[in-house]
Image (cartoon, rainbow, N blue to C red):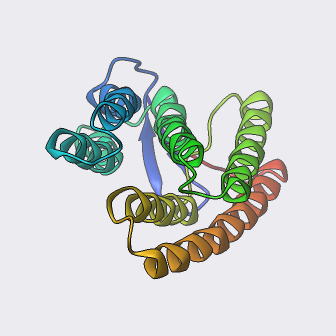
Amino acid sequence: MREVTNIDGKKVLVKDDIFTWSNLISFSRVLVVWPIIYLHIQNYEQVNGPIFLLMVYGVASDYLDGLVARWKNEISELGKILDPVADKLMAFFLFLYTVMLGWIPVWYFVIGVIRDLCIMAGSLIIKKRSGKVAMSIMAGKVSVNIMALYWISVFFFREATTLQNWLMYLSVAFMIYSLIKYIIRFKKILNGANFN
């Protein structure tokens, strides 16, 4: 375990543990995708109680893993990878499913995938050069949350097309904004800035 000062100037304890409660919560977030899709298909593309509860858990776990990591002092190198990867995998498969249903435009999905690939490529370069993983930034979390709201509006409220369009374009704006913020942080780190 070591104490580091991140790029925002905050002191953080980082462990090398693999089996932590926060990591298990992050991993479980990916596992809820398959039952959601399966139940939705079995229920003739209608939402039911179990689907709703699984979605609530998926969304809540995104906050819960970070809270548990800080509360139990379990911030780990694996957790810094697992949390955003779990977000991206859950989003990828749920968005892909709704694209296949024709509910979300392909161009939107492509923008999201390209953004995520750029962020992941930057993270891999940072990991290779420094030996550690940079945590997600707030702009990225906000972007993911707006994307989630857009997906939820499409999946649960099929008739709310005005809301869906508004959230779609807002999330595109935040995807671009957060990517710019990640690029700025990437450059700072490559120029020697300390990070967690």
Quarter of the image for residue 71 reads top left
| Left or right, 149 with reference to 42 | right
| Left or right, 2 with reference to 107 | left
Residue displayed at 41% across by 40% down: 13
Q: Report x, y in % for residue 100.
A: 58, 42
Residue displayed at 47% across by 65% down: 150
Query: Furthest-front residue in view?
Result: 44
User: Against 47, is 27 above or below?
Assistant: above
Question: Can you say which quadrant of the picture contains the C terminus?
Answer: top right
* Observer-nearest of 61 and 90: 90
| Left or right, 40 with reference to 133 | left
User: Against 153, is 112 above or below?
Assistant: above
| Left or right, 158 with reference to 54 | right
Query: Furthest-left residue in view?
Result: 49
User: Against 78, is 66 above or below?
Assistant: below
Q: Report x, y in % for residue 26.
A: 37, 33
Q: How many marks?
A: 0
Quarter of the image for residue 173 reads bottom right
Question: Can you say which quadrant of the picture contains the N terminus?
Answer: top left
* Observer-nearest of 143 and 97: 97
Q: Report x, y in % for residue 160.
A: 39, 75
User: Against 178, is 132 above or below?
Assistant: above
* Observer-nearest of 151 and 170: 151
Quarter of the image for residue 14 reads top left
Q: Report x, y in % for residue 49.
A: 15, 45
Residue displayed at 41% across by 30% down: 30
Residue displayed at 71% across by 40% down: 120
